[in-house]
Image: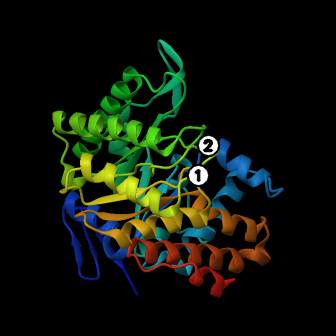
């Protein structure tokens, strides 16, 4: 059984053979051995919509019960290296009084925290957005680190459309990501930088590649200028895909090839891990694309996942807010976690899905 021993004085963690003495160790552990990240950092508003879709009321207790159910699933062990939490969740205790962050560490994963404060319209380009939250970030990171967070996450959003994204949008959002990353590292946590190029739209995969390349090159220029430790950073990007409304949809292999080509040209090899977001893909597509990239190979980083809906949706549908469905929901989450671990190792195939149906 995996156990994390926490020494709060020395900020030292041990997980089996892993001794997590510094930020580089923590970043490497999160993506080690095919492990990925469970994104469970939905705001109360977003969580409310998901619960409404299964005719379940959104209360603090129900949100806690749902997330506790996920965190206690057997499939968290060995398949998940980190769990991203929302502010409410990182402060909550399970039904039996155990802090939820201790439930997570008891499963052999590390707790993290979403620290951005959402989007606001970009001045001068109201179709686009800029992420908020830098003003009091240092104080909040200090508190989250004391609570027990080992990493943090900040999301920037880049939208593809007519005459967008603008250079202003990319530059200001990547600058903010670099500022955030430096503040997080100064507070003894690993930053996950998430520059999401939205899948929404009718754009081609070629247009997505172009925008993704500009976004990633700008991001790493900003990170380097801000003296962010790249070896203690994790990247959470979008895959290079066709727009969701495009008439012609790229194949699994084309998505894998174009995404890898973009990453290899713009991401330094010393980065420990790339944990892709699913970004509106189906759960199976997100797994298939990740597996195809790892089967191609030819890169130094760990290529893994940081999925929200693509991990949770089957569990949510199985649960339906009912206690009698908890085991079935946990099995659904465990299956998706295992499938994505196999994809992160390049060992997935569609027959594994059929055999579990």
x 32%, y 43%: residue: 142
Decide if residue 100 is in sight here. Answer: no
x 79%, y 69%: residue: 322
Labelled pair 1, 2 in contact (Cβ < 8 Å): yes
If the image is split into quadrants, where does the C terminus sit? Answer: bottom right
Q: Which residue lies furthest to the front in this view?
A: 248
The colour scheme is rainbow
Q: In this view, does 148 lie to the left or right of 324?
A: left
For residue 256, above or below residue 108 = above
Name the spot of residue 131 as percent of width and height, x first: 45, 30
For residue 330, above or below residue 221 = below
Q: In this view, does 164 lie to the left or right of 309?
A: left
Decide if residue 261 is in sight here. Answer: yes
Residue indicated by mark 2:
246
> Residue 130 versus residue 320: which sits nearer the camera?
130
Of helix, strand and loop, which one carries label 2? loop
Q: Is residue 169 left or right of residue 321?
A: left
x 60%, y 64%: residue: 283
x 54%, y 47%: residue: 242
Name the spot of residue 310 as percent of width and height, x first: 58, 61
Q: Is residue 44 left or right of residue 286?
A: right
Name the spot of residue 335 as percent of width and height, x first: 58, 78
Q: Residue furthest top?
A: 124
Residue 249 is labelled as 1
Please identify the quarter of the rendering in which residue 180 is found.
top left
């Amino acid at each position: 059984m995996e156990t994390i021993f926490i020494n709060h004085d020395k900020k030292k963690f041990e997980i089996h053979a892993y001794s997590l003495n510094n930020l580089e160790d923590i970043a490497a552990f999160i993506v080690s051995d095919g492990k990925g990240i469970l994104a469970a950092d939905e705001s109360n508003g977003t969580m409310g919509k998901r619960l409404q879709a299964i005719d379940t009321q959104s209360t603090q207790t129900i949100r806690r019960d749902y997330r506790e159910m996920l965190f206690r699933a057997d499939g968290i062990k060995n398949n998940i290296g980190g769990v991203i939490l929302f502010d409410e969740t990182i402060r909550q205790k399970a039904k039996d009084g155990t802090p939820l962050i201790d439930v997570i560490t008891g499963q052999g994963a590390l707790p993290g925290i979403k620290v951005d404060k959402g989007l606001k319209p970009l001045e001068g380009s109201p179709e686009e957005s800029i992420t908020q939250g830098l003003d009091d970030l240092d104080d909040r990171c200090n508190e989250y680190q004391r609570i027990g967070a080992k990493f943090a996450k900040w999301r920037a959003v880049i939208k593809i459309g007519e005459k967008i994204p603008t250079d202003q949008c990319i530059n200001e959002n990547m600058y903010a990501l670099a500022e955030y990353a430096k503040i997080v590292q100064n507070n003894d946590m690993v930053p996950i930088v998430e520059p999401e190029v939205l899948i929404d739209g009718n754009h081609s995969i070629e247009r997505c590649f172009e925008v993704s390349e500009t976004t990633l090159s700008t991001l790493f220029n900003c990170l380097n200028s801000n003296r962010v430790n790249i070896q203690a950073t994790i990247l959470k990007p979008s895959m290079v895909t066709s727009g969701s409304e495009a008439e012609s949809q790229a194949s699994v292999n084309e998505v894998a090839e174009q995404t890898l080509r973009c990453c290899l040209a713009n991401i330094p090899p010393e980065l420990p891990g790339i944990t892709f977001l699913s970004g509106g893909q189906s759960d199976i597509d997100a797994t298939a694309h990740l597996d195809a990239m790892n089967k191609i190979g030819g890169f130094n980083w760990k290529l893994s996942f940081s999925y929200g809906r693509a991990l949770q949706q089957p569990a949510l549908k199985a649960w339906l807010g009912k206690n009698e469905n908890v085991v079935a929901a946990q099995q659904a989450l465990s299956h998706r976690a295992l499938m994505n671990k196999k994809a992160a190792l390049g060992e997935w195939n569609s027959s594994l899905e059929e055999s579990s149906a």
